Image: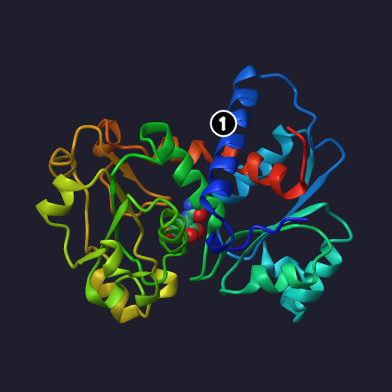
Amino acid sequence: MKHVISADQYSKKDILEILNLAKKMETILNNGKVCELSKGKILATFFYEPSTRTRLSFETAMLRLGGQVISVSDVKNSSVKKGETIEDTAKIASGYADIIALRSPEAGYAQRAADVSAVPILNAGDGAGEHPSQSFLDLYTIAKHFDLEKDELVVSMVGELICGRTVHSLSKMLRNFPQIKQNFVAPAEIQMPDKYFFAEKGDQKFYELNDEVLTTSDIIYDTRIQKERLSPEVYEKHKNAFHFDCEKVNKMKKNALLMHPLPRVNEISPEVDALPQAKYFEQAKNGVPTRMALIAYALGLEV
Ligand code: NCD
């Protein structure tokens, strides 16, 4: 049984294996044939925070694999509202389902569920902690455009980095590819926490989105300023800290990628969507084959 909790679990070999599995899943999807790899298996999704892409793509992934889905998306209608612990919820759900995807408003819940669950737990985002399945789809997207193992890429993470679970997991996963340099671009108050920053590995901090970042990055990974995780004062101060319009994106390299886990609020103008660098919708679509791969990996399915 393999839980998917943190980017820390994965070596370069594991990551490449999962990306390769995602590629096979994409071929299965493109063939349009009915797939029965997960026939008879049930995925339970517990989302105690809002989600569109992550929940729908996990559920689509299980359905495309021939499995079935049961779902709790509204905490008001579950026993957590009555005070049930995540441990009890996970124990019960692991008696009903073969695999569980869990999103929680606090860090550490996925691990707590994994500690007691009889079936694999997939961390679908735990508060300001991690979001490993997002990182796999991010890497899958990057690998479609660059050679992850050889290209000397500069990845600039931009926006709200202090609580951003997407960038926390992505930063850790990218450490497996030492030729890739990381820049963190955010005002000091919402910069990347120190535990993710390694000057000796070439990391750099920037406090504004300047031309150096725009013109030298191969990947700009933009993120939302997360109102729900910041104090009202900090949010108000930085809510419009960065804004990508066509003028800025046109300064990027022609083959650079502008990525974003979405939802975007006002970080990227809709006009940018038509530019060749805009890859966020492609990235969201990659969630399905990648999550099919993660379900197959966690369940130990023969593909
Ligand atoms: C992200 C998340 O929930 O952490 N969204 C996602 O899963 N695609 C980012 C965000 O909400 O800003």
For residue 297, which quarter of the picture? top right
Q: Residue at x 19, y 45 (%)?
A: 245
Q: Secondary structure at mark 1?
A: helix
For badge 1, the amino acid type reads Lys
Q: Position of residue 201 (x, y in %)?
A: 30, 63
**Along the horizontal axis of the image, is 192 left or right of 301?**
left
Label 1 crowd bin: few (<14), some (14–19), many (20+), radius 10 Å: some
- Where does residue 157 sit, x and y in percent of width and height? 31, 57
User: Which quadrant of the structure image shows residue 153?
Assistant: top left
Residue wearing tag 1: 23
Quadrant for the C terminus in the image: top right
Q: 193 or 13: which is nearer to us?
A: 13
Q: Is residue 142 above or below residue 112?
A: above
Write the residue at 45% across / 59% down.
Answer: 166
**Position of 118 relative to 271 (above/below):** below
User: Where is 215 relative to 8, above or below?
Assistant: above
